[in-house]
Amino acid sequence: MTAGDGNQLISVHPEDLKFIFELEKQSFCDLKVANNTEHHVAFKVKTTSPKKYFVRPNTGVIQPWDSCVIRVTLQAQREYPSDMQCKDKFLLQSTIVPPHADVDELPPDTFNKDSDGKVIHDRKLRVVYIPPSSTQGNSEDEGLKGSTQSPDANSAVQSLKDERDAAVRQTQLLQQELDLLRRRRYRKSDPGFSLMFAFVVGLIGIMVGFLLNLSLSSPSTE
């Protein structure tokens, strides 16, 4: 049995997947998914164009009143869509699961609508492509009002800010994976855990160092 949008287990922000569309470049959109209940809620992301997008994670379990970030990456495209209109669709499914359920141990029929008595909540997300120029117009206009910097300087500052923000988001995703690995460590024995744990910790350290370096090296905009 499926449920409409009126009584959702989870909330999603933003409600649309918005991608800055540039040829031969990847673009991503982060979705914050929050569990608004006292139950453990499992989710799964589906799309009509699985070869165009990379979703991480595409399945997970959110603890009561907790949240997680889903990153959807649009793969580099070689041509513009007609009128910059996208017909791709995403479906975010959610359902209540037993307490302390692990994402790797979810039954195959967790999101099966044919299961007796099970309620599956469906939330449709549409895809919006945004031209690069429209995302820069407002910020550039505001910057010119209080700054006499050249266009090249403004571009360099914006580029550093974008890299810093991307590093912050990537660090948050790595931290979520690290927390998941820690929980798995106490639930079952995994011979490859130590190596994976050390790799993730090292990667987070590199990202944090990169983030600090960007923060220290960013030119002042005052």
Image: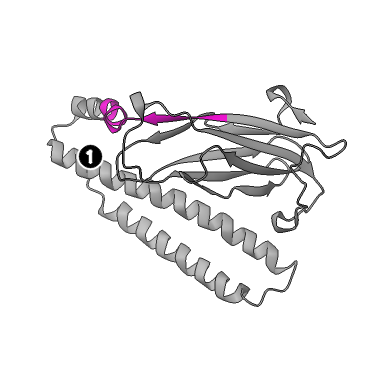
Task: Confirm whether the magenta stretch covers residue 65.
Answer: no
| 171 relative to 6 in the view: left or right | left
- As helix, strand or loop, the secondary structure at mark 1 comes to loop
Question: x, y (%) of residue 1?
Answer: 80, 31
Residue 198 shown left or right of residue 36 in the figure: left
- From the top left corner, tell me how far across and down residue 74 is, in percent: 43, 43
**Residue 106 vertical position relative to residue 136 in the rendered view, above or below:** below
Quadrant housing residue 188: bottom right
- Front-lying residue, 17 or 221: 17
Question: Quadrant of the rendered structure where residue 176 is?
Answer: bottom right
Q: Amino acid at mark 1?
A: Thr
Extreme residue toward the top, this view = 6
**As displayed, is residue 35 above or below residue 213?**
above
User: Does residue 185 appear left or right of residue 214 in this picture?
Assistant: right
Image coordinates for residue 156, horizontal then vertical, percent: 21, 44
Residue extending farthest to the bottom is 191
Is 26 drawn above or below residue 130 in the view shown?
below
> x, y percentage for residue 145?
20, 24
The residue at the point 17 percent across, 31 percent down is: 147
Based on the picture, tell me whether residue 134 belongs to the magenta stretch.
yes
Numbered range of the magenta stretch: 125-139
How many numbered callouts? 1
Q: Circle 1 is placed at which residue position?
A: 221
The residue sitting at 35% across, 59% down in the picture is 210
Q: Residues within 10 Å of mark 1 (few under 14, many from 20)?
A: few
- Give the side of residue 118 with respect to residue 135, left or right: right
